[in-house]
Amino acid sequence: MMQSLYTASTGMLGMQTQIDTTANNIANVNTIGFKKSRAEFADLMYHVSQYAGTSTSDVTKSPTGIEVGLGVRPTAINKIFSEGSLKQTDNELDVAITGKGFFGMELPDGTLVYSRNGAFKIDNTGTMVNSDGYTLIPQVIIPENATNVSIGTDGIVTVIQAGQAQATQIGQINTTNFVNPAGLHSLGDNLYIETDSSGQPVEGTPGLDGLGVLRQGFVELSNVELVVELTDLITGQRAYDSNSKVITTSDEMLQTTNNLKR
């Protein structure tokens, strides 16, 4: 059997991974805080008929050798944590991070998760939560009679309550960073959890120790660049078609061989 059949099939599978990754990026072009992914590949092992440096005579050696590659394999799908553009919303509970860091939240089962989506709401107790009702950590509770909420670039939350002229500090929004954010595990819903590869979470005050500052009244848009993704989609499609053509050509060559007569 011709090796090209198997080699081209690895190419088709690899390009399917590329297209699937690109499709997910495009689908989330308008998802707040979404971070795009990039598929990465490596060539497979090689069939060596002759090693470079093999003697070809008493005084000469092969300068290159004969090595035939056996295809490609996906090695990683890397999450790219570059910053997305900021969109002004004028909603006092919307918060964007300019720079490094994640908001910490707690799931109903107590699991700590992390997100770049700062479109917060308040629940029936006044607690700041995300759109799914997961509590922001550290917990911030907005008083019922608050007439104005202010969130500083350093995460300090102050309110002006009815009948008062002075602002009162009611909480602090901290952010968390990781040594290797690309090692975080994606849960969906713009949420991540730590892994052994991401390193331990390091919580701190926004604006200090390399953490980004907060911007009230803004949300961070997806960092997907649609033109780039469409280009990658076309490239992946063409590569997929080309690999399928290799399989067709190899099949035709095998048919020709089978049709040979003595």
Image (cartoon, grey):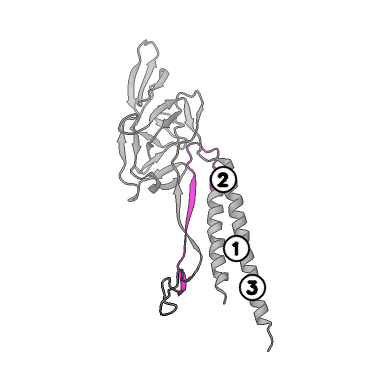
In three-dimensional space, the C-alpha distance between marks 3 and 2, rounded to whole angstroms, equals 33 Å
Crowd band around label 1 with a 10 angstrom C-alpha radius: few (<14), some (14–19), many (20+): many
Q: Is residue 210 left or right of residue 85?
A: left
Return the residue nearer the eye: 203 or 141: 203
Q: Residue at position x 40%, y 28% from top?
A: 214
Residue 152 appears anywhere in the view: yes
Q: Tag 3: residue type?
A: Asp
What residue is pinned by disc 1?
243
- Magenta-drawn segment: 24-50
> Looking at the image, is 212 positioned above or below residue 5?
above
Question: Where is residue 70 shown, x and y percent of the image?
Answer: 50, 68
Q: Is residue 232 left or right of residue 211?
A: right
What residue is pinned by disc 3?
251
> Looking at the image, is 158 positioned above or below residue 111?
above
> Looking at the image, is 170 positioned above or below residue 22?
above
What residue is pinned by disc 2?
229
In three-dimensional space, the C-alpha distance between marks 3 and 1, rounded to whole angstroms, equals 13 Å
